[in-house]
Image (tube, helix red, strand yellow):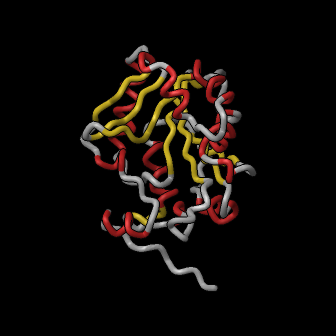
Amino acid sequence: MSTPASLEGVLLAAGESRRMGYPKALLTLEGDTFISHLTRRMLAVVPRLIVVVGAYGELVHAAVPADRRIRVVINPNFRAGQLSSLKCALAAVHPNSVGIMLHLIDHPLVATQTFERMSEEFMGLARPIVIARYAGKRGHPVIFGRPLFEELLAAPLDRGARVVVDRDPARVAYVDVPDAGVTADLDTPADLAQAGLAPPPKIDG
């Protein structure tokens, strides 16, 4: 029995979290880790989720919820940036997937309803790129249709996925959502404090 065509989730959690000083995937929100919180919200919308780990690989991998719908992919080249992790994820996407909903571990405040809205808009629009936007500022998640996978795989690591987004504005649709979480990039302890979240635990030694 074949798997019906669907949108697949990708969650990037491979970064070194240098400015945070602690693995962002293991920070807490509403009594849960960022990684658990986001996997639950994304899996409420997509049937399958690829989580890419790299730095702190074993720790982050161990924190990923046990769920047969989740596939963990290791990026050994995580220091090359987010696009290197995205390329690892694309290699694991199901052949029947119509595209990917890409999200980042440092944007944990996005509401489930936003993921739902993004999926609905992508399925209803004839655009291969759909980007969440709040108050005029674009953020995450971002959806890439399958026709753009080869472009993403060929994109230079030092320029990131933005080079594909910016190549042709006519291919891009923006979805304005009432969700400040799409632009809330939590990279530092100060960002956590501003969002009303607990500071990162201190690491002994």
Residue shown at the point (68%, 60%) measured from the top left: 57
Tell me residue 123's x, y (percent): 42, 21
Residue shown at the point (65%, 66%) measured from the top left: 59
Q: Is residue 36 left or right of residue 153?
A: left
Tell me residue 7's x, y (percent): 51, 29
Depth check: 164 or 39 in front? 164
Quadrant housing residue 83: top right
Numbered circles on residues, count: 0
Is there any visible trace of residue 3 in the rendered image?
no
143 to 157, vertically: above or below = above
Tell me residue 16's x, y (percent): 61, 60
Residue shown at the point (65%, 58%) measured from the top left: 61
25 to 198, vertically: above or below = above
Tell me residue 111's x, y (percent): 34, 47
80 to 56, vertically: above or below = above
Q: Quadrant of the C terminus?
A: bottom right
Q: Quadrant of the N terminus?
A: top right
